[in-house]
Amino acid sequence: ISIDNGVGAQPLNGTAIVHPSATTLYTLTATGDDGTVTCTQTITVGKPIVVPPTISSLSPTSGPVGTRVAITGTGFTSTNNSIKFGGGYLNGLSSNGTTMTFTIPSSLGTCLPAGGTTCPALAMVVLPGSSYAVSVINANGTSNTKTFTVTSGGVPESPSVNSLSPASGVVGTVITITGSGFTATGNTVHFGVGGKKNVSSSNGTSISYTIPNSVSGCDLWTSSFSCTQVVSLVTPGTYTIYVTNANGTSNSKTFTVASPPTISSISGPTSRTVGQSGTWTVNASVSGGGNVSYSVVWGDELSAADAAAAATRLVSSATFTHVYMKAGTYTPRFTVSNSNGLAQKNAASVSVAPIVSSLSPTSGKVGTVVTIAGSGFTATGNTVHFGVGGKLNVSSSNGTSISYTIPNSVSACDLFGSTCRSPQYLVSPGAYSISVSSANVTSNAKTFTVN
């Protein structure tokens, strides 16, 4: 019994568990002595119920620029909440689901980034004596609004970091630091023991920073004397990022410098016969630990969806079982990915041979027509081997039988074409081996006796 969409061969009385990401039609094929039957089953994947966020209160409801405001409500996501404040937005805020805090900025961007894009250089100035509608926007929708009144006074807003996007990546990754209180010029981004000085912010709420390949205290050096501190390469691990400017020092967020996982070994068979199950084990590791995702493309899938459905998720190894139903040489390709989307690929090779199960008859004279029964024969292009010779380009109408006439002579040239110069040998009484090659892979042999 086999099931498509990457599920593969199944025991007669077994249970197959599938996890489709979308509504999928599965076809089950059962093959026995009386033939082949199929049936189908559709697994319907519904959409989750989404409840938009709701604001119940702001505390306080008024104050000058720099006031810290707590929003209480429901439906806030753990990350990537945006607060709409009048006609501007504070993006990338985190929450425990029911509370969220932000600082009244002196200015803020006027766009809601989509797909991680950076807000362009547009800024809205926050004016004392004005009231602003406050709402929360996240993946669940847009909340109701509450009103905050900005009063006169206050102190310059200290920088605050709400989020890093992305929060992990490799050296060279450009990240967006989202928050508030960033000055137009003169911000310093601190990364580990180093960082970058004189970073600008076009809107006071976002800064772009590129993860460097090395850091040093000299990155932040302000003295007129030469800096002689050691330069350290940025290796996989976690690094603290925060922002300072003339108004103060922000809180910090953590960025993870990732490395791709390593495939240490792939073990599995190098040869199978058609219909014979094979098991491959992939061992991998990832720097710093954590889960890795394993997937395989077998090479005989009917569609890309079949390959994707073969994925599983484990820590250090994964075992895959597959049955090839056609002869040929295949290159199963294994991919191991970590949670940062970094991947390593490696491949194995397996030759899948057709099977000769019987000859009918098993003996006879020259000119006898023999039916070769088996499996895995291709529609065209099969080669029948008979002694030292045989016949090229033999067809099979059903993949399970081939007709072959016992010749009166054989030569190696039977299998190499007209340019061959090997001699011809008469077929005399005796035993001759018969085998079949399909897709350049040769089956087992059976014996035919010439009377």
Image (cartoon, rainbow, N blue to C red):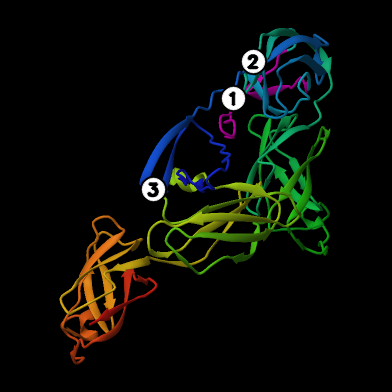
Numbered disc 3: secondary structure: loop
Q: Which residue is mark 1?
A: 112
Q: Nearer the viewer, residue 418 or 177?
A: 418
Q: Alpha-carbon distance for marks 2 and 1?
A: 17 Å
Q: Which residue is mark 2?
A: 52
Q: Alpha-carbon distance for marks 3 and 2?
A: 41 Å
Identify whether 135 is placed above or below 410: above
Residue 130 appears anywhere in the view: no
Numbered disc 2: secondary structure: loop
Q: Nearer the viewer, mark 3 or mark 2?
A: 3
Which disc, if any, is residue 302? 3
| Majority secondary structure in the magenta region | loop
Write the residue at 66% across / 46% down. 339
Q: Amino acid at mark 2?
A: Pro
Q: Nearer the viewer, residue 426 or 363?
A: 363
Q: Nearer the viewer, mark 2 or mark 1?
A: 2
Magenta stretch encompasses residue 381: no
